[in-house]
């Protein structure tokens, strides 16, 4: 992506908001970025199209998974840079509570950085950061830097 | 097997959830603990604008949904359930501009939990783009289940 190549060339972290805006599926889901004290948090505002169970109502497990995966990818780019997006190798999502029809936030951290692969943990919460709705562990392949 | 059509109907209704509709996914076949779904390629699904490859989350959503549909069609009675966990291996990136198919199977239903696996592919089932293993928690009416507690 041009904005990643430019940031890599200028040896600075790319703008997470611009990164998310440049990815069509992230735009579709309405995902945006907030940076405070050097920490990246992603926001997915509630929208009716994110619903998987209209009776409860609850967010779709796939919407939760897609948001967590986006948080993991954005964190890797934010911390490590790179001219291309990291590619998911495998992910495991644990669903801890049902996702309610309210805004969601997610934050990720790199648990281990290898030469070619990073292990990333991500967590999604809604009103109470102490009560995570879902968590993700995954391996991502780094683009050659 | 008189309950089969009702459960197939209940499972088919799951294909109409808002998130899957927003992706453009559709059910092709469902019944007896198995499902086959299709997701046509669309520009809004792209996760990497350099390559046009769809976002991994799109595949995750289709696998989750297809496994859920398979669970619904395997149950002897209609009841709500929720994804407990989902593990996905991304074998290779999906080729842009080609439909994605997902086949899912409910392997076992216990009193509390249903176990599933799924496969996502494009032109051939022998060349999967992703595999999934997932467990679903059944919310039986005879339990004091409190989702989201």
Image (cartoon, coloured by chain):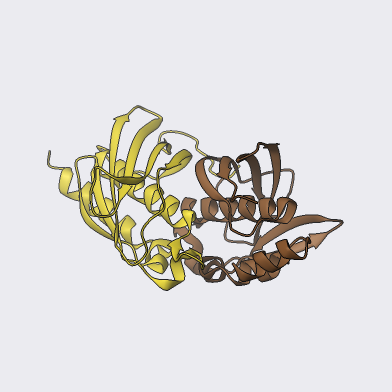
Chain colours: A brown, B yellow
Quadrant where the C terminus of chain B is found in the figure: top right
In this view of the protein, can residue A99 be seen by the observer? Answer: no
Nearest to the observer: residue B4 or residue B12: B12
Residue B141 found in image quarter: top left
- The quadrant of the rendering that contains the N terminus of chain B is top left
Residue A75 vs B39, above or below: the answer is: above
Q: Residue furthest left?
A: B2
Q: Residue at x 84, y 56 (%)?
A: A38
Nearer to the camera, A5 or A69: A5
Residue placed furthest toward the top: B110
Image coordinates of residue B52 in percent, x first then y, are 44, 66
Residue A42's spot in the image, x, y percent?
Answer: 68, 59
- For the question of whether residue A64 can be seen, the reply is yes
Give the residue at x 39% y 40%.
B132
Between A123 and A112, the one lying in front of the other is A112
Residue B4 shown left or right of residue B41 in the figure: left
Residue A30 percent location from the top left of the image: 58, 69
Between residue A19 and residue A31, name the one nearer to us.
Answer: A19
Q: For residue B39, what is the image quadrant?
A: bottom left
Q: Which residue is located at x 24 percent, y 45 percent?
A: B125
Residue A94 as seen in the image, left or right of residue A5: left
Residue A87 % position (x, y) = 53, 50
Please identify the residue farthest to the right as the structure is shown.
A37
Task: Kindly indicate the quadrant of the structure image that contains residue B100.
Answer: bottom left
In the image, residue B142 above or below residue B147: above
Residue at 38% x, 70% y: name it: B42
Vertical position of residue B77 compared to residue A102: above or below: above
């Amino acid at each position: 992506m041009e904005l990643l190549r430019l940031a890599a060339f200028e040896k600075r972290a790319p703008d997470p908001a611009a990164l998310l805006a440049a990815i069509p599926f992230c735009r579709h889901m309405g995902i945006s970025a907030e940076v405070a004290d050097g920490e990246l948090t992603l926001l997915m505002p509630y929208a009716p199209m994110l619903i998987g169970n209209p009776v409860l109502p609850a967010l779709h497990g796939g919407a939760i998974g897609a948001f967590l995966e986006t948080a993991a990818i954005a964190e890797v780019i934010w911390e490590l840079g790179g001219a291309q997006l990291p590619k998911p190798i495998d992910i495991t999502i644990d669903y801890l509570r049902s996702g309610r029809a309210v805004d969601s936030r997610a934050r990720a951290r790199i648990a281990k950085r290898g030469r070619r692969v990073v292990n990333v943990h991500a967590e999604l919460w809604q009103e109470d950061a102490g009560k995570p709705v879902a968590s993700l562990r995954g391996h991502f392949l780094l683009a050659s830097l | 097997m008189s309950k089969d059509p009702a459960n197939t109907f209940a499972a088919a209704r799951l294909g109409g959830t808002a998130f899957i509709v927003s992706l453009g996914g559709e059910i092709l076949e469902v019944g007896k603990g198995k499902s086959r779904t299709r997701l046509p390629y669309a520009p809004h699904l792209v996760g990497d604008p350099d390559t046009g490859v769809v976002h991994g989350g799109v595949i995750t959503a289709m696998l989750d949904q297809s496994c859920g549909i398979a669970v619904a069609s395997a149950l002897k009675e209609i009841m709500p359930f929720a994804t407990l966990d989902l593990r996905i291996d991304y074998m290779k990136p999906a080729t842009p501009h080609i439909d994605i198919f997902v086949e899912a199977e409910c392997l076992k239903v216990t009193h509390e939990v249903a176990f599933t696996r799924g496969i996502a592919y494009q032109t051939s089932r022998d060349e999967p783009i992703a595999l999934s293993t997932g467990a679903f928690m059944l919310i039986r009416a005879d339990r004091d289940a409190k989702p989201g507690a």
